[in-house]
Amino acid sequence: MRVLVTGAAGYLGRDVCHILAESGIDVLATDQNLRHRLPVPMRVANLLDRFACYQILEGVDIVVHLAGHPRDYTPSIQLGLTENVTLTTNLLQAGVEQGVRRFLFA
């Protein structure tokens, strides 16, 4: 079983990666900027790019989706919301087509 953790560079994402890895689960971490070292394979990906979502989900059984722009990241609240919805939609669509069995979203 392979688990993809999005938003792996964030506080919650890092902790989830550590806990899953310590439990012996095959974890793949992704974020736009992986500035922290994690005990799992890491891949930089822009989830606003639908093709990147298809690539990152190859061989993944479960997605733990923690990625998203915080309120103060984007110049406007509307842009942040639009991008968060887009990247989540991209992951869901690619996940269905790639055969992902579970999608956990926080």
Image: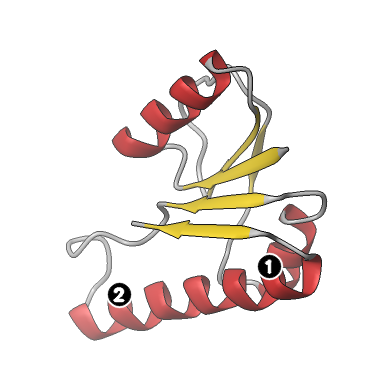
Label 2 Cα crowd, 10 Å radius (few <14 / some 14-19 / many 20+): some
Q: How is the image coloured?
A: secondary structure
Q: Which mark is residue 80?
A: 2
**Circle count:** 2
**Where is residue 9 shown, x and y percent of the image?**
43, 37
**What residue is drawn where x is 44% and y is 47%?**
7
Quadrant where the N terminus sits is top right
**What residue is drawn where x is 42% and y is 32%?**
16
Q: Is residue 72 above or below residue 85?
A: above
Label 1 Cα crowd, 10 Å radius (few <14 / some 14-19 / many 20+): many
Label 2 – label 1 distance at C-alpha = 22 Å
State the residue in front, 68 or 105. 105
Left or right of 71? Residue 15 is right
Q: Is residue 38 visible?
A: yes
Left or right of 50? Residue 64 is left
Query: What SS does tag 2 mark?
Result: helix
| Quadrant of the image occupied by residue 106 | bottom left
**What residue is drawn where x is 52% and y is 35%?**
34
State the residue in front, 12 or 52. 12
Left or right of 85? Residue 75 is left
- In the rendered structure, which amino acid carries the disc numbered 1? Gly
- In the rendered structure, which amino acid carries the disc numbered 2? Gly
**Where is residue 14 shown, x and y percent of the image?**
41, 30
State the residue in front, 103 or 8. 103
| Residue matched to label 1 | 95
Query: What SS does tag 1 mark?
Result: helix
